[in-house]
Image (spheres, rainbow, N blue to C red):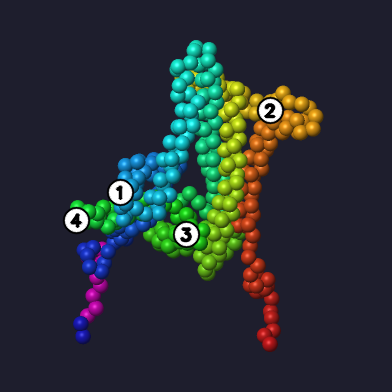
Amino acid sequence: MQPVTSVNVENLPNVGYLVSDKEKKEKFFKNESHIYKQGPLEGVKVGAHKLYNDVLTYYPKGFAGSKNSDFYEYLSLGMVPNIIGSLMLMASYGLVNYKFSADDARFANISFKQAASGVVLYALGKWAFQKFARTVINKFTDVNIDLFYKKQVIELPELGQEKGLVRTQYPKVYDSVQFYRSDLLTKDGELNHNNAYYHDDKIVRKVGYKDKKNASNQMASEKIRGVKARTTALENIGKYVLAATGVALGSQNAFGKIDLKSPRTIVNAFKEGAVELWKGRDIDVKTTGIGKIMKSLYKHSGKGLVIASAVMAFLTCLIPILAFKHKPDFMKDKVDTKKEYEVC
């Protein structure tokens, strides 16, 4: 009988069936979709990546009828017409102002600055509302709706190519309500936290359960879908309310005085414009009947937009969080395990 000898695993080469954890991670991160470390400006970086590829890659592929154009690229293409439309709207107020007389050009430039401010504040309002709501919701639920993952897409060979190109995409883990990428969360937990249910356990603890659950992924998946669905529905209303408030703010007289060479004028425009928007303006109409109603609405419309924006921001954070914190009414929670029961 051969004696059993011990083997020093550390001295074995990392080939065959024995592969180090480091090599496993490196191979996985190189070839597979995965969640990666993200900074506070990750959304800006991904947006810049999409815009760059929209212009140089996705649109040319789409117009050429490429078989490799996919849904991610299709959704990304919306950035370009939005930017072009915004620039055209601003240009329509100031493109020919240089042909006016000095006095006319001065008044025309005021309208141009107000229109341009409205366009910028429209986009800024939508972004700020969504960023604020999702940051608060992530704080109380641990569901980061803006969590990106890196995806390597191997394309089919195009005409004249021996093999297809490999492109990088940055979708979001929670893009789909029903089919969010739970597999990536599980893999990230295994590789980086030695616990496949790491993310699910965190979410369940945020619900209010201090004890570890045997199948935390089941409860977590339901909570994740609820947060995503409710947040998206409320955002689709709230962010446009704030965007409309931004347009109204940009139309105030204070924004007609902006000088881009002087940052102080921009700060003053926000302060003075906010006061103007809240106080409202009077219009010269009859103060009887429908004219009186229209005058009142016009006077208080700015104030109404500000209040509506604040209410929608509050509700967009509150409703998903309250629903998330609601604990399922499990039968085992009703049973006192310390009490003796007679089995019939």
Residue under label 4, please give it.
162
Predominant SS of the magenta segment: loop
Q: Position of residue 316 (x, y in %)?
A: 61, 48
The magenta stretch spans residue 9: yes
Find out whether the residues at labels 1 and 4 contact each other: C-beta distance under 8 Å: no
Task: Name the residue furthest bottom.
Answer: 344
10 Å neighbourhood of mark 3: few (<14), some, or many (≥20)? some
Asked if residue 26 is among those painted magenta in the image, a careful observer would answer no
Q: Position of residue 107 (x, y in %)?
A: 55, 17
Where is 58 relative to 324, above or below? Answer: above
For mark 2, give the secondary structure: loop
| Quarter of the rendering containing residue 1 | bottom left
Q: Which residues are magenta?
A: 3-12
- N-terminal of the pair, mark 2 or mark 3, is 3
Mark number displayed over residue 280: 2
Seen at 22% across and 68% down, the residue is 16
Residue ID for mark 1: 64
Q: What amino acid is found at the position of numbered circle 2 in the picture? A: Gly
